[in-house]
């Protein structure tokens, strides 16, 4: 059995158990390999590296480094060296390395690959990795070299593929798209509601980034032509978020149309949104947005943000509407389109469900694709760096 060494800052561990579970689900669903995980946790304005095992082949790692990627390479080199030493002590001999983010995890994987003389692959994430690449021009040459040394790179959506193909100067054949496993991926038959009842789900602490103000203004603007239009906002957040959201809704005078609802457990999201005309979330910025996929699988048309998130996974007008999240007129147009075309959109979603068109977005399809990518990476030769990173 081949051993895959995972380097991830987004894996729930004993130090930070509430991280997103997408990487954990991907590894759990992909059988036939030994998966060894080093879960990275940065501590600001500290030094050193420390380990804590939290399960079989699962090691939490804390390391010190300044925020904002200051001194990125000098602080990540000791992390890579410490992992190499720890692997030797545990008698673990990996066959390939998978870094689950490019800007930080990828640096560690690249350094480790040079020490261990094995190939590595690396995910490309939209928001975080784009931010690093854009804000650190001095490191762009290094990142281009890192991308060139990777066996291949793995974006989650077409827009991420396009961004990094252009900015890293990559051959398109070296980009292998892999969608993200969601918390729930049941398919639920669409039900036509026939009323302008809309729903959104997000963490309330991110309400500004998730476009709640824009949605609320759009709902208010549509009220004269759609007297029954409402928006239910499911989620949870801290007391500050609750006060800020409430103040904003009062300011916009939409309290009778926009309702804050209780948080939904992952197993309840799909059955809840199935009862609405549409799921709407004009996020800015948005890396992927697993809840969009869950909503479509639940038989509900979606409003997503153009050129980010799930853009490119669906054709505009096919399962919903891709809007400009900074344009109130376009968000209004998107909500109008979803409400007025609800029956047609849900018929199309139902047809695609029955034809298996969403298989590549569900757990079985994603894990099968990932197995193929791991096998391809294992067949790639190790590429040595021209000089030490």
Image: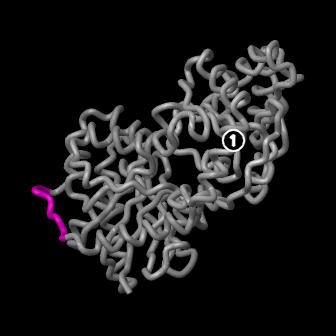
Spot occupied by residue 10 in the image (x, y as percentages of width and height): 52, 57
The residue at 19%/69% (across/down) is 382
386 drawn magenta: yes
The residue at 48%/53% (across/down) is 42
Residue 67 sits in quarter: top left
Q: Nearer the viewer, residue 386 or 296?
A: 296
Give the structural element (helix, strand or loop) at label 1: loop
Question: Which corner quadrant holds the C terminus?
Answer: bottom left
Determine whether, in the image, residue 316 is placed left or right of residue 296: left
Residue 341 sits in quarter: top right
Range shown magenta: 381-387
The residue at 79%/53% (across/down) is 271
Magenta-colored segment: predominant secondary structure: loop
Per the image, the residue denoted by label 1 is 202
Dot 1 crowding, Cα within 10 Å, few <14, some 14–19, many 20+: many
Question: Which corner quadrant holds the N terminus?
Answer: bottom left
Residue 142 sits in quarter: top left
Whether 27 is drawn above or below 323: the answer is below
């Amino acid at each position: 059995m081949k051993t895959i060494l995972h380097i991830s800052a987004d894996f729930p561990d004993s130090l930070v158990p509430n991280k997103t579970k997408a990487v954990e689900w991907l590894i759990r669903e992909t059988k036939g390999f030994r998966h060894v995980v080093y879960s990275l946790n940065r501590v600001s304005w500290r030094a050193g590296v420390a380990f804590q095992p939290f399960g079989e082949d699962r090691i939490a790692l804390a390391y010190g480094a300044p925020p904002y990627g200051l001194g990125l390479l000098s602080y990540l080199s000791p992390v890579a060296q410490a992992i190499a030493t720890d692997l030797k002590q545990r008698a673990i001999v990996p066959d390939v390395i998978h870094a689950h983010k490019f800007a930080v995890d990828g640096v560690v994987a690249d350094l480790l690959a040079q020490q261990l003389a094995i190939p590595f692959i690396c995910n490309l994430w939209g928001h975080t990795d784009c931010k690093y690449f854009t804000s650190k021009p001095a490191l762009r040459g290094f990142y281009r070299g890192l991308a060139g040394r990777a066996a291949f790179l793995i974006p989650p959506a077409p827009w991420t593929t396009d961004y990094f193909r252009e900015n890293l100067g990559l051959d398109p054949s070296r980009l292998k798209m892999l969608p993200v496993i969601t918390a729930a991926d049941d398919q639920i038959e669409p039900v036509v509601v026939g009323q302008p009842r809309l729903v959104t789900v997000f963490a309330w602490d991110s309400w500004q980034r998730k476009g709640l103000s824009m949605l609320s203004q759009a709902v208010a603007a549509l009220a004269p032509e759609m007297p029954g239009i409402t928006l239910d906002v499911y989620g949870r957040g801290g007391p500050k978020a609750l006060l800020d959201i409430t103040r904003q809704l009062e300011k916009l005078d939409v309290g009778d149309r926009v309702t804050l609802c209780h948080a939904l457990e992952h197993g309840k999201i799909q059955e809840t949104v199935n009862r609405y005309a549409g799921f709407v979330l004009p996020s800015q910025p948005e890396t992927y947005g697993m809840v969009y996929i869950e909503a479509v699988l639940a038989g509900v048309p979606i409003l997503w943000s153009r050129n980010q998130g799930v853009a490119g996974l669906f054709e505009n007008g096919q399962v919903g509407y891709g809007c400009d999240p900074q344009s109130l007129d376009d968000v209004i147009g998107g909500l109008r389109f979803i409400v007025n075309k609800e029956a047609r959109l849900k018929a199309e979603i139902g047809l695609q469900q029955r034809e298996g068109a969403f298989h590549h977005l569900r757990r079985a399809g994603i894990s099968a694709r990932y197995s193929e990518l791991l096998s391809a990476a294992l067949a790639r030769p190790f590429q040595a760096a021209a000089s030490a990173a």
